[in-house]
Image (tube, grey):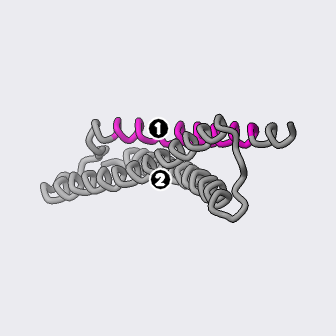
Amino acid sequence: MNNNDNETANRFNQFSEELRGKIDNLLKQVLLIATGIQTITIGAFLSGKAPKLPTDAITLLQNGWLALSISIVCVLIFMLLQVIGLVQVGRLHIKKIENGNSALEILKGWKPLRILNVIIGFSAISFCISGVYLISQSAMLLISSTNA
């Protein structure tokens, strides 16, 4: 392997680490938003002075909670699949080392796993956005009904 190959591999590794870091940060934000909103809104209903919501607002709130819950589950599945993918890449790397192959090669996880992770990742973000929207709509109905 020449020096140019080494430099290219190092740049690719840096890019991969930066991309994984950004994905991890985005997922942490989704978890923070989803769990935070659920905690606040559910806490309001478990307190002694639960707000009286119109029927439409209750439906929106329930659907918002469901969307946020699905988002949380999607993030957890995504993280699990990331670990499984990394284990699979690690096995490929071990096999490569055991075979004495020192050629530069990009090791990737299974393509179906990568595709599934993209779908689950976008689903997590979409459900989080939907949940925030639905709960916001519910809150606006609550505000408009108390001002009427």
Using the image, determine if residue 16 lies above or below residue 134. Answer: below
Counting from the top left corner in percent of width and height, residue 84 is at: 29, 53
For residue 123, the mark is 1
Residue at image x 48%, y 37%? 122
Residue placed most toward the observer, 124 or 132: 132
Does the rendering let one see residue 130?
yes
- Secondary element under disc 2, as helix, strand or loop, is helix
Q: Which residues are magenta?
A: 114-141
Residue placed most toward the observer, 124 or 136: 136
Give the amino acid at mark 1: Ser
Does the rendering let one see residue 14?
no
Q: Earlier in the sequence, mark 1 or mark 2?
A: 2
Residue at image x 58%, y 37%? 130
Question: Looking at the image, how many numbered discs can be counted on the residues?
Answer: 2
Counting from the top left corner in percent of width and height, residue 143 is at: 80, 42
Residue picked out by circle 2? 17
Q: Are marks 1 and 2 in contact (CB under 8 Å)?
A: no
Residue placed most toward the observer, 67 or 15: 67
> Is residue 111 a member of the stretch shown in magenta?
no
In the rendered structure, the answer to whether residue 52 lies left or right of residue 127 reads right
Local crowd at mark 1 within 10 Å, few (<14), some, or many (≥20)?
Answer: some
Give the amino acid at mark 2: Glu
In the rendered structure, the answer to whether residue 39 lies left or right of residue 107 reads right
Q: What is the quadrant of residue 137 in the picture? A: top right
Counting from the top left corner in percent of width and height, residue 2 is at: 34, 48
